[in-house]
Amino acid sequence: KAGVTQTPRYLIKTRGQQVTLSCSPISGHRSVSWYQQTPGQGLQFLFEYFSETQRNKGNFPGRFSGRQFSNSRSEMNVSTLELGDSALYLCASSPTGTGGQPQHFGDGTRLSIL
Amino acid sequence: DQQVKQNSPSLSVQEGRISILNCDYTNSMFDYFLWYKKYPAEGPTFLISISSIKDKNEDGRFTVFLNKSAKHLSLHIVPSQPGDSAVYFCAASPTLYQAGTALIFGKGTTLSVSS
């Protein structure tokens, strides 16, 4: 069974630009969550989508947004990039996103802001 | 304020011995707990979980213990193998069975198993 696929694996951008990251969940999984990992803050929850609807959102500015398509694939967008946005962005999927289900992670997109 | 804490940044163990990784939490609403393992350049891999209605869960060499009164959980790896060398993250989520649940992670413990 294929795992969670994230593209691209690496991105380099400059301040002020915007970026879109993509995530394909495990087949049959309809919930997709996004996390940001930085050395200082660790892994922090960004948002969760199910059936094309955002059900939960973490404490991040509005520059961070996402969406989910009817095939459960998800994209995350960051606008007006700042140096502090340099991080590993991880996507995770689960069957329904209900508590009590483990989330399965992709290998992440490493975003570097110059 | 960190709700999930892994107070030991690193742990070194000899092959064949037991590895014990610890995790403390502060939020009484947490009722589902997970352990993940992460190798460099890879995403976290789910290892084992436990819900608050249990105090122990086993899966092969991995056992997780939950002490709700102390708000403490631990992961035991027996016997430890060199391939277990990785960063281990403890995670918690509130309200079992709630939709859209977010995982709250500790900052990780780096386990090194020497042969």
Image: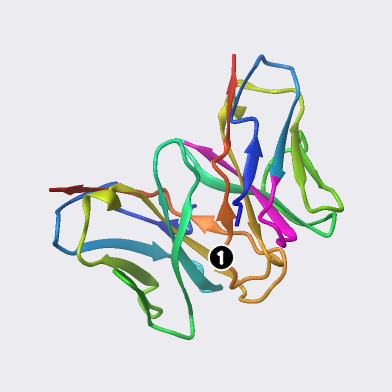
On the rendered structure, is A17 left or right of B92? right
B26 magenta-colored: no
In which quarter of the view is residue B104 placed? Answer: bottom right
On the rendered structure, is A113 left or right of B64? right
State the extent of the magenta-drawn residues as a range.
A24-38
Residue named by callout 1: A102
How far across and down, in percent of the image, does residue A23 sit?
Answer: 69, 43
State which chain disc 1 sits on: A
User: Which residue is at the front of the view, A7 or B53?
Assistant: A7
How far across and down, in percent of the image, does residue B63 sit?
Answer: 32, 72
In which quarter of the view is residue B65 placed? Answer: bottom left
Q: Residues within 10 Å of mark 1 (few under 14, many from 20)?
A: many
Magenta: main secondary structure equals: strand
User: In the image, what residue occupies the spot 29% across and 53% down?
Assistant: B84
How far across and down, in percent of the image, does residue A104 sit?
Answer: 57, 56
User: In the image, what residue occupies the spot 69% across and 65% down?
Assistant: A97
In the rendered image, which quarter contains the N terminus of chain A?
bottom right
User: In the image, what residue occupies the spot 28% across and 48% down?
Assistant: B85
Q: Residue furthest front?
A: A1
How far across and down, in percent of the image, does residue B15 sit?
Answer: 14, 55
User: In the image, what residue occupies the spot 47% across and 54% down?
Assistant: B45
What amino acid does circle 1 point to?
Pro
